[in-house]
Image (spheres, rainbow, N blue to C red):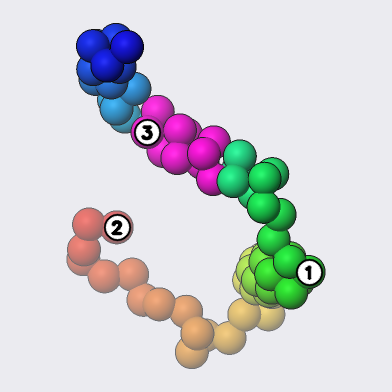
Amino acid sequence: MASVVWQVWPHITQGAEVNNLTWLIRASRWVRNPPGPRRIKLVFGIIAAGLAMLALEKLGWWPDWATLERGRGRW
């Protein structure tokens, strides 16, 4: 069995597959041990705050002092 795992492992670890596997394992842990109500409220609160900031920016109501200037960097 171990030899099969080591033969398959290089194919699993290429690119985004590792990230997908990590999220799949995390999701399976959430199914076995679901988070409490406080954590769910926290996650939805963070998502709502992000969507509110996105809406403010798209509507043009985002303040200039909170906007980063584009530099000469990579991004």
The location of residue 74, given as percent across then percent down, is 22, 57
**Front position among marks 2 and 3:** 3
Indicate the amino acid at tag 3.
Answer: Val
Is residue 34 something one can see in this rendering?
yes
- Residue labelled with disc 1: 37
17 or 9: nearer the eye? 9
Q: Nearer the viewer, mark 3 or mark 1?
A: 1
- Which corner quadrant of the image does residue 49 belong to? bottom right
Look at the image and tell me whether residue 44 can be seen: no
Q: Secondary structure at mark 2?
A: loop
Image location (x, y in percent) of residue 41 = 76, 71
> In the displayed structure, would residue 75 be above or below residue 25?
below
Is 8 left, or right, of 65 in this rendering?
A: left
Residue annotated with mark 3: 18
Q: Which mark is residue 75?
A: 2
**For residue 12, side relative to residue 3 (left or right):** right
In the rendered structure, are the residues bearing label 2 and label 3 in contact, judged by CB atoms less than 8 Å apart?
Answer: no
Q: Kindly report the distance in space between the C-alpha atoms of the residues bearing marks 1 and 2.
A: 38 Å
Do the residues bearing badges 1 and 2 touch, measured as CB atoms within 8 Å? no
Q: Nearer the viewer, residue 64 or 17?
A: 17
Amino acid at dot 2 = Trp
Tag 1 secondary structure = helix
Range of residues picked out in magenta:
17-26
Name the image quarter holding the C terminus.
Answer: bottom left
Residue at the location (48% across, 89% down)? 65
Q: Residues within 10 Å of mark 3 (few under 14, many from 20)?
A: few
**Residue sitting farthest toward the bottom:** 65
